[in-house]
Amino acid sequence: MFKNMLSNKWFKFIVVAVLYTLWVIWLGNFWWLFVLIIIFDVYITGKVHWAFWKKKDPPGGKQTKLVEWIDAIIFAVIAATFIRMFFIEAYTIPTSSMEKSLLVGDYLFVSKVAYGPKTPNTPLSFPFVHNTLPLTSSKKSYVEWIKSPYKRLKGFGDIKNNDVVVFHFPEGDTVALLMQNQSYYQLKRTYGRDRVWNETRNFGKVIARPVDKRENYIKRCVGIPGDKIEIKQGQVMVNDQPQPKFEGVQYNYLVQTNGTSINPKALDKLHIANDDRTVFSSERYLFPLTASSAESLKAFANVSHIEKLEEEPGEWDPHIFPHSKDYPWNVDNYGPLTIPAKGQTVSLTVENLPMYERIIQVYENNQLEVKNNTIYINGDVAVDYTFQMDYYWMMGDNRHNSADSRYWGFVPEDHVVGKASFIWLSLDKDKSLPQKIRLRRMFQFIK
């Protein structure tokens, strides 16, 4: 009886129609309910042959093997695309900016329902790739003649302090194709705009990308909207309180020995990757270390001195956001600044404009000009500004080796992809099989 119920066309229709209707309610666009007419025809009336790649009445009631394969591939692509778009997406750690919390070679699942998935800005794109077609470095995998505005569906919660978050790179709106792993704006500050645009042999063609096709980054959310952020001698302060300590947070240390080399196998045991071992001589090294690794290294018989590297307060680093001498900040001494919140209004001056100009002009699409020390927004004199979105402050746990909010500023809410949730595989690029597989990291939830 149960088997007969499962094969009943009305039962199938009701189940699919209910699930589809729940999805439309979640999506919040009730025009999609018209698709119920198609679902009704597929399961009940059968007036239209929707699966045009199949024969409607095949001999013996069975399709050919080729058609069965096509059917399976189409179903797999649609199902996987739907899951990837609305529920969960795989992600790989490409750089050491989150070590030792997350390692190069960690394979993660990113939950999009944690904060609510956002609908794609460019819905027509090649499946399973991000921004370029397979086997190419510059061919776009998407079309821009159909675009949709930013919209985020309901999720299980909001971003909280210290969540590990995947997001689109805020400065990734413009890219030099031969240097995609570097910020175009940093290249422009370093080499000048004319050189970046004209020397295509070195930098490649300069292109623009929509929000959902910018490179994905992963960092820890240090500050949420309205938080006050400050860094004092490397210690992150949130609302005047020290950020909670994480075992994986590491800083650069200068290590001095008595003249003998440190055994590489000993560094392996401390999980210091080959790429992180800077050797000045047999007696001087530079390593990124966690607090516990630094203590372990101090106990080595041939280590005579170990020193945590820190920049001095007041030393201005021009690479540091907001890239103005009015803010003499560096990676270890930064702020204070308050993270913008939706609906919050701030006074605007020529002095503090570098802090907010990218928000006003790029993220919230206003025309911004400064004439004779007067600020104009969309042609009108502006003495204040009200933010249209929430913003976040992201930092890598590898504090001296992370390109993060200290370099490019705030992360808009429409750039947030999801929460890094689960490590399902971890491969050490410095090892060969079977040691290459980090069994101790597999099937772990991310903290």
Image (spheres, rainbow, N blue to C red):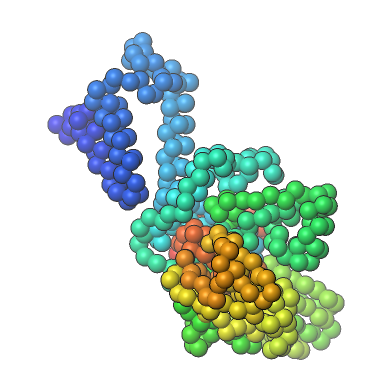
> What residue appears at the point 44 percent right and 69 percent down from the top-left corner?
342
Q: Going by the picture, which residue comes out furthest to the left? A: 1
In the image, residue 17 lies at what x, y percent? 26, 38
Q: Residue at x 43, y 24 (%)?
A: 68
Can I make out residue 7 in this image?
Answer: yes
Report the number of numbered marks: 0
Give the camera-side residue of 192 and 183: 192
Check the image and report above or below for 9 versus 223. Answer: above
Indicate the position of residue 312 as horizontal and vertical percent values: 71, 88
Left or right of residue 163: residue 249 = right
In the image shown, does 68 or 141 lie closer to the viewer? Answer: 141
Q: Is residue 32 above or below residue 201?
A: above
Q: What's the residue at 40%, 61% (across, down)?
A: 114
In the image: residue 240, left or right of residue 18:
right
Rendered position, 214 above or below 44: below
Whole-percent x and y of residue 80?
45, 42
How far from the left and from the top, in percent, is residue 367?
Answer: 59, 61
The quarter of the picture where residue 158 lies is bottom left
Give the left or right position of residue 410, taking residue 259 as reference: left
Q: Residue at x 42, y 50 (%)?
A: 86
Front-lying residue, 436 or 214? 214
Q: Looking at the rendering, in which quadrant would you find the N terminus?
A: top left
